[in-house]
């Protein structure tokens, strides 16, 4: 499938346009089955979950990150994934850690309100976009924000597994890690303020 300018929205995101709906599995013979094998490199990892994703109409996920490494495999159809590294978190305004959706962005990236989320205007400067077709797979590291667009009749499977860093973090050390991380973030913010003061 080729992408034309008409498929790109005002935010530079690919929005699939479907002229006709065709069953992506229609070429299978009667009685055929699809077998999904776990990738070999995951055999030595503790799988947290395996998820099956299916949609019959065009869809778009919320912008979020997962607390696990993620291997997204497209079985049929097509998906576009927009990715932001953890360093772009400040532009995506994560929801409060006190809520159930703390791993989701509070920004409506289709119609952002820059009065409420002024830093969001820089979000698209830090993203990467990947187009996945049937048979393609994408590794999404833990903590990377992503938004997924799917064309009609798309089937995908993803595998989640914990990172080595998370496996190594003992819960009794949480308070210590939190203090170290908070201290580093405060120091970084101080450095930014000093540098911006010097440049102005």
Image (spheres, helix red, strand yellow):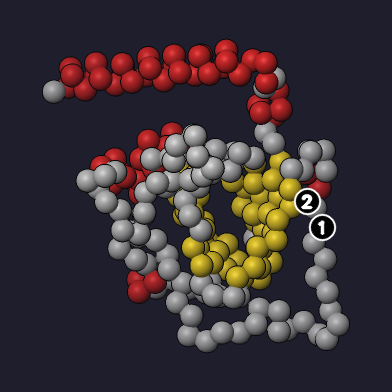
Q: Which residue is tagged 1?
A: 37
Say if residue 88 shows up in the picture: no
The answer to whether mark 1 and mark 2 are in CB contact below 8 A is yes
Q: Quadrant of residue 68?
A: top right
Q: Counting other residues with Cα less than 10 Å from the Cα at mark 1, is it few (<14), some (14-19), or many (20 or more)? A: few
Q: Residue at x 71, y 84 (%)?
A: 26
**Alpha carbons under labels 1 and 2: distance apart:** 6 Å
Q: Which mark is residue 39?
A: 2
Q: Quadrant of residue 25?
A: bottom right
Secondary structure beneath label 1: loop
Q: Residue at x 47, y 51 (%)?
A: 63
Say if residue 110 shows up in the picture: yes
Seen in the image, is 6 located left or right of residue 102?
left
Q: Residue at x 57, y 62 (%)?
A: 132
Decide: is 36 above or below 107: below
Query: Outermost residue toward the left?
Result: 200
Q: Percent x, y for residue 23?
A: 65, 82
Secondary structure beneath label 2: loop
Seen in the image, is 176 located left or right of residue 169?
left
Q: Percent x, y for residue 184?
A: 44, 16
The C terminus lies in which quarter of the figure?
Answer: top left
Q: Residue at x 59, y 75 (%)?
A: 56
Decide: is 32 above or below 140: below
Decide: is 90 above or below 23: above
Q: Percent x, y for residue 108?
A: 36, 54
Decide: is 200 above or below 48: above
Q: Percent x, y for residue 168?
A: 70, 23
Q: Which mark is residue 96?
A: none
């Amino acid at each position: 499938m080729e992408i034309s300018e008409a498929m790109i929205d005002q935010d530079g995101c690919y929005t699939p346009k479907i002229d006709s709906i065709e069953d992506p599995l229609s070429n299978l013979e009667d009685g055929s089955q699809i077998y999904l094998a776990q990738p070999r490199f995951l055999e030595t990892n503790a799988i947290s979950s395996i998820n099956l994703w299916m949609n019959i109409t065009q869809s778009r996920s919320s912008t979020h990150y997962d607390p696990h490494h993620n291997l997204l495999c497209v079985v049929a159809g097509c998906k576009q994934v927009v990715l932001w590294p953890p360093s772009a978190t400040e532009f995506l305004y994560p929801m409060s850690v006190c809520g159930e959706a703390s791993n989701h962005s509070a920004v409506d990236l289709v119609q952002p309100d820059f009065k409420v989320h002024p830093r969001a205007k820089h979000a698209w400067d830090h993203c990467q976009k990947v187009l996945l077709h049937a048979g393609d797979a994408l590794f999404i590291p833990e903590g990377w924000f992503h938004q997924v667009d799917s064309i009609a009749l798309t089937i995908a499977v993803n595998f989640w597994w914990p990172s080595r860093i998370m496996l190594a973090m003992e819960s009794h050390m949480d308070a210590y890690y939190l203090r170290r991380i908070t201290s580093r973030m405060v120091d970084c913010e101080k450095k930014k303020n000093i540098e911006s003061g010097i440049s102005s």
